[in-house]
Amino acid sequence: MSAVSVAPSTPLPAVTKVPFGRLLLVEWRKMTDTRAGRALLIISAGMLLLAMGIVVLVAALNDNFSLGLSAWSSILTIPLSLLTPVLAIMIVTQEWGQRTNMVTFSLEPSRLRVMAAKLVAVVALALVLIAVALVCGVVGNALAAAVGGYDASWSINGEVLAWTIVQQLLYFVSAFGLAMCLLSTPFSIVVVYVDQLLLPLMVWSTLYFIFDWAADVIPFIDMGYALSPFAAGAGSVPAGADLPDVGTQQVLALICSIFLWVVVPVALGAYRVLKSEVK
Amino acid sequence: MIKVEGLTRVYGTFTAVDDVSFTAEAGKVTGFLGPNGAGKSTTMRIMVGLTNPTKGRATINGSLYADLPNPGRHVGVLLDASAQHDGRTGREVLTLAAMTMGLPKSRVDEMLELVSLTPSEAKRRIKNYSLGMKQRLGIAHALIGDPKVLILDEPANGLDPAGIRWMRGLLKEYADRGGTVLLSSHLLHEVEQIADELILIGNGRIVAEGTKDTILASQGTAGQSLVTSLDNEALTVALKAKGYSVEPVGTGMRVSAAPAEVGKAALESNVVLTDLRDGGAGLEDIFLQLTAETQRENVAQIHAEGVSA
C-alpha cells in the first residue's frame, strides 16, 4: 500500500487564482453529474416533448384547428416555467443538503464568486432549455400543420418572445434568490411555487375580480401581473387581467415587483450565504 | 506552517473556542487532542474560513485562508468525510476537485491508487461507500492538489487497523517531505503514535502542549516508581532514609523516586525486587486529568477502575 508516494509523478501546473470560467465549468458539471440532476433534465425534456405531442395530436384530431408559431412558443413555456425554478433551487440548496458546501467553499473561499458561478451556470442552462423549447415549437408547428392539413403560420412577434424570455429569467433568478435565503430544498420549492403559481392563480385572480383596487395594487406585488401589459399577447396574461396600456404606473409596478421578488431575495440570500457558518 | 492567535468563537453564552493560540510547524505532525465537543472541529473550521472567529485569527504560511490563491493547492482539508454528495461517484468527487484546482485528469487516477480505491470502487456512488472508504476518498481529496499543509479532522475514523497504519505511514512521509500536518482526534493512542507535537484541548481552551515527553514532565509526574519486593518493610526504611516518600499501593509501594534510585536502595539494603517500574502517569492519565471538567463521565471513577483493572 505504501509503494505509492504522496508526491505527484509529474509536476503540477503553477498555482494561480481559480479563474471564474473554471468555477463555471465545475458548477455546470455539478448539475449533470448526479442521478437527481440528470433526472430533472430528462423530465424537463420529456415535458416539452409531451406538450408538443399533445398539441400535435389535437391538431390531427380536430378539423378546423390551426396554431401559429407564436402560440406554440407560449404553450411550450408552460412546462419550462413549471420545472426550471427547481433547477435554480437545487443548484443552491443541494450544497447545503448534502453538505458539499464544506468542500466547495474550502476550494474557493469567496462564496460570492461561487454563487455567481452557480447563477451564470444555471441561467445558461435555462437559456439552453428555452432554445430547445423554441426548436420544439418550430418542429411542432410544422408537424401540426402537416397532420392537421393546414398551412403553417410562421409569424412570431419578436418583442413578445423577448418579454416571455425575460419573464422566465426573472422567475428563475427569483427562485435562485429565495433558495439562498432558505437553504433548504423542500422549503424553497414550496415557497417558490406558492409565489409563482398558487398566489397568482388562486388569490390574486380572485381579488382582481372582486375588488377594484386590486388591479392597481397587485401588479406592484406580483411579477406576473406587472409583466402582463408588457408581454401582452404572449399567452402569459393572468386570468381576469384586462391589459392596461403601458404607462408610468405600469413601469413603476414592474420595478417594484422585480425589487420585491428578485432584488430583495438575491440580496438577503447572498448575505445569508456569506455570513452563515458552514458545517 | 499554521499559526493560530487568540482564536475565540462564542455562540450566544457558550464559548466553543476560548483564546486558543498555537503553531503547527512544517515538517511535523501536530496532534490536536480533546474530548468530544472540546472545540477541535470549530477551531479547524475557523482555520479554513468556514466559520468566522469572534476574535483572533488563524494564518496558513502567513496568510489568511481566504487570501490564498487556489487554496486547494496550499492546504489539503478533510473536515468530514461524509460531507459528499451521495449520488456522485468517488471518481467524480475527485474530478470536480481536480477541475477546480486546474489539475490534469491523470492526478485523479494517481490519487485513487494512492488511497487504494480500486477502479470499480471509484465508479460506485458515495451512498454505497463504507465510512472507511469515504475516509480514504477524503484523504485523496485533501492530497490531490499536492498541498504544503494538511488539516484533517478525525481522519482515522472508520479506518481498519491496516488502514490506520497505512495512514500513519502516509502522514509521516508527508511531514518528512516538509509538509505541515494538523490532525485532530479523540483517540489518544492513535495520535500518540504519529504526532511529534501534541496540543491538548478541553472546554475550548488549550490545557497542555508540547512533545509527549515535555507534557509528561510538565505535569510533574516524572520520578515516580511502583515497586514490589520480598521485604517491603526493609525497603521502605531504606527509601525513607534517603528522603523519599513511600506509600503502600496494593501489594507494593509508590515511591517518589526514579526506578534507578529505588533499585540502588534495594541493592544497598539487600532486598530482592519482584517488580519495579516507572510510576509516572501516562499520557492518558494526564489527558483525563487535564480535561476532567469537560469529560462527560466522572474521571475519578474511570481512573479508579483503570487502577484496579
Image (spheres, rainbow, N blue to C red):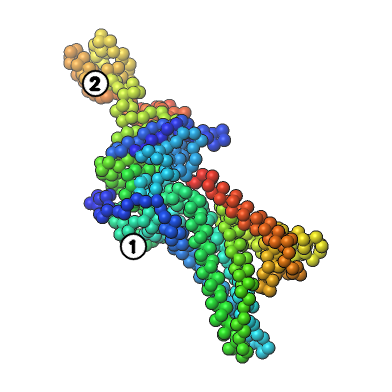
The answer to whether residue B4 is left or right of residue A71 is left
Q: Secondary structure at mark 2?
A: helix
The residue marked by circle 2 belongs to what chain?
Answer: B
Is residue A250 visible in the rendered image? The answer is yes
**Residue A189 visible, this angle:** no
Foreground residue among B269 and B91: B91
**The residue under label 1 is which amino acid type?**
Ser
Crowding near pointer 1: few (<14 within 10 Å), some, many (20+)?
Answer: few
Mark 1 lies on residue: B120
Mark 2, residue position: B259
Outermost residue toward the top in this view: B241
For image coordinates 25% across by 54% down, the residue present is A9
Which amino acid, mark 2? Answer: Pro
**Quadrant of the image occupied by residue B245:** top left
Determine which of the numbered discs, if any, sits on residue B45 in the image: none
Lower position in the chain sequence, tag 2 or tag 1: 1
Write the residue at 33% across / 41% down: B181
Q: Position of residue A25 (x, y in %)?
A: 43, 61
B139 shown above or below B253: below
Cα separation between marks 2 and 1: 56 Å
Looking at the image, residue A54 lies above or below residue B163: below
Above or below, A133 against B69 in this view is below
